[in-house]
Amino acid sequence: MSAASTIRYWQTPLLPGVELCRARHLDFSYGRHVHLDYHIGLVQYGGQRFIHKGSSHALVAGTLSTVNPDEVHDGLSLLPEGYEVRVFSLPPAQLAALLPQADGRFFASPLLARPDLYAGFARLHAWLEQPHSDPLQVEEETLRLLATLFALPGHSHALGDPQLRVLRDYLMATLDARHTLEDLGQVVGLTRFAFLRQFKQRTGITPYAWLKRLRLEQGKKLLADGQGISDVALAVGFFDQSHFHHGFRQAYGLTPAQFRQQMLR
């Protein structure tokens, strides 16, 4: 490895079985090789040139590299200043566990010019570097991105108002719990992928965004009753007071302390 390279590999319980890598290279190159897993890569600085099935490709910001298991490829810097790359390594068994509908599918091309997917995977990778990212938010984004990447067919929505009311009551009773798409889907009798897609089609927002708003709305009520800010933050499911403060100000335009002071005058 070149002395000019910095490479970090890690795993996270937020996405079990998936290997993550963030690397910065100046003159280090990857010789021709294969992987056992699906590789999704994105360059955030500089550019990478790679040979895939005998053809040369340039990976730059805004474009994803999508390499299937057992496909021969290499990688080297496209520019003198080197490059920085983020990579997801997704075992086939893990893909099947996350999205059974994608089991056995393959990437059609080694490059995908989709700025929306590029931004989404970059955001997800950055979340997975943080120790306190929300599991439901990570799960939602992972399934959404993979479903789009593998062009999975959509579902006509079947969620009705009675199901949403049941789900709302369930969440209001468990605001301080960690939720997954699987357990929320079970409440309304849907698989997690079907639940995610149908909920977004029915409401226009994701389950995570809805849950976060329910937490903030209940937080307002508790603050208005005079409860302490740190106690309220934990009671409604925020990791700590700082996360509650940021979410509250983003939603309502003032801090929890300011809101509480106004309501208790």
Image (spheres, rainbow, N blue to C red):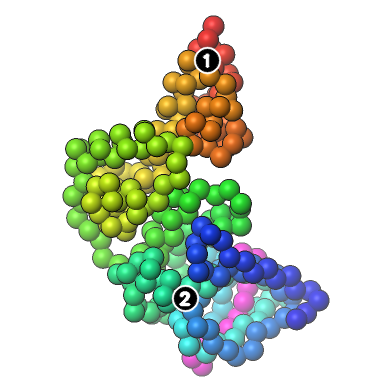
Magenta-highlighted residues: 44-54
| Disc 2 residue type (three-letter) | Pro
Q: Which mark identifies residue 91?
A: 2
Assign the C terminus to one quadrant of the image: top right
The chief SS type of the magenta part is strand
Residue drawn at (23%, 51%), measured in percent from left and top? 189
Q: Secondary structure at mark 2?
A: loop
What is the tally of numbered marks visible in this picture? 2
Residue drawn at (74%, 70%), measured in percent from left and top? 6
Q: Secondary structure at mark 1?
A: loop
Residues at circles 1 and 2 in contact by the CB criterion of under 8 Å:
no
Residue drawn at (32%, 69%), measured in percent from left and top? 100
> Quick one: 51 or 258, which is closer to the camera?
258
The reply to whether residue 248 is in sight is no
Which image quadrant for residue 29? bottom right
Extreme residue in the top direction:
265
User: In x, y percent, where is residue 81?
Assistant: 73, 72
Residue 46 magenta: yes
Residue 225 magenta: no
